[in-house]
Image: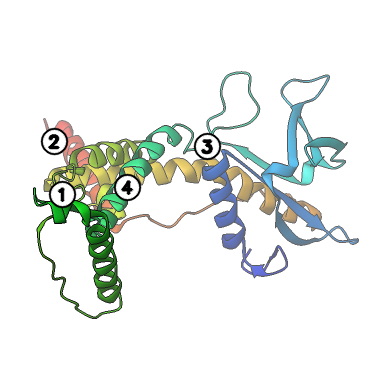
Amino acid sequence: MKNVNVGGINRGIECFIANYLDDLLMYGNAIGEIVLEKGNNIVGLFNADVKNISVKPTEKNPLEVDFFINSNGVINSKVKNKNLILFTALNPKSSEYTGVSILNSLPFVSKILLQIYNSIGTNFERIGNVRYAVTYKPSNDAMDKVYAKERASLIAKEWSDGMKALSQGCVKDFVTVGDVDIKVIGADNQIIDTQVPVRQMLEQIVAKIGIPPFLLGLSWSTTERMSKQQADLLTTELEFYRRIISPVILKVARTFLRLNGYSDEPIIKWNTINLKDEVEQATALFYNAKAESLKKQN
């Protein structure tokens, strides 16, 4: 298990399961293959691309499935030895043989969140790169009216030169005569407070994924009891994924034992997710034993 070849570049079933679980969460389906050599020994494990495989029920038995290889979106051939195929579907719908991604319902929420972030970036770009409106108002003097066009062109040229020098790190004064009004374009527009809508969208994403906010770097106000409950929910989620992945690991181990002439049935011993959970379980067992003892005494 520690030294099995995985895809030709990794070693150990942990690498295989990590890629397998990543595909399962991302696409709702994960598929792998047990690769055998001529002597019927396991030479390695391979993580297949979910997009290149189709799953269909067999013609005679709806409780069994066949696997087909896709090429350019066209189903070409059926996998001959499906007993060497490792396949898992995440939360499949009724009468469906493929699963649903954990991100299935998030594109709409993510699209709104990206629109908010894009608008924030546009607003700050406008603030950092200010645009000006320069207005020249000629007086009632006849000479001002005659040369209004030339003066406006000169003002525009000098203003453009000043802005170009500023972009190059040089400060250039702008001096003019007459009634000239300079305003910042869009200065009256206030930046919308996005804290509330962003948090609402993030809450939807966190609720769907099932990960406590503090693990994603979201410093939301929470109580100690709430943090404990969130940690318990995360532990439950991890236990759920362990139960889904266990048949795949057992199939690999069982295949290896059978090919080597052993009839023993393998078991999986998972490491404790959190030592605190172990302590709480021990405390619960202690209280149950104490209650049982008191019942016997009474």
Q: Which quarter of the rendering shows the N terminus?
A: bottom right
Amino acid identity at mark 3? Ser
Label annotation for residue 101: 3
274 horizontally vs 84: left or right: left
Q: Determine the image quadrant of residue 167.
A: bottom left
Measure how far apart labels 1 and 3 are at the Cα level.
Answer: 45 Å
Earlier along the polypeptide chain: callout 1 or callout 2? 1
Find numbered disc 1 in the image and state the secondary structure of the residue it sits on. loop
Cα distance in 3D space between marks 1 and 2:
76 Å
Which element carries disc 3, helix, strand or loop?
loop
* Left or right of 47 on screen, residue 115: left
> Which residue carries the number 2 mark?
294
**Mark 2 falls on what kind of element?**
helix
Using a 10 Å C-alpha cutoff, classify the residue at mark 4 as few (fewer than 14 neighbours), some (14 to 19) or many (20 or more): some
Mark whose residue sits in front, 4 or 2: 4
Q: Earlier in the sequence, mark 1 or mark 3?
A: 3
Q: How is the image coloured?
A: rainbow
In the figure, is residue 93 to the left or right of 251? left
Q: Check residue 187 in the rendering and tell me which mark sits there, or answer none.
A: 1
Question: Mark 1 touching mark 2, by CB under 8 A?
Answer: no
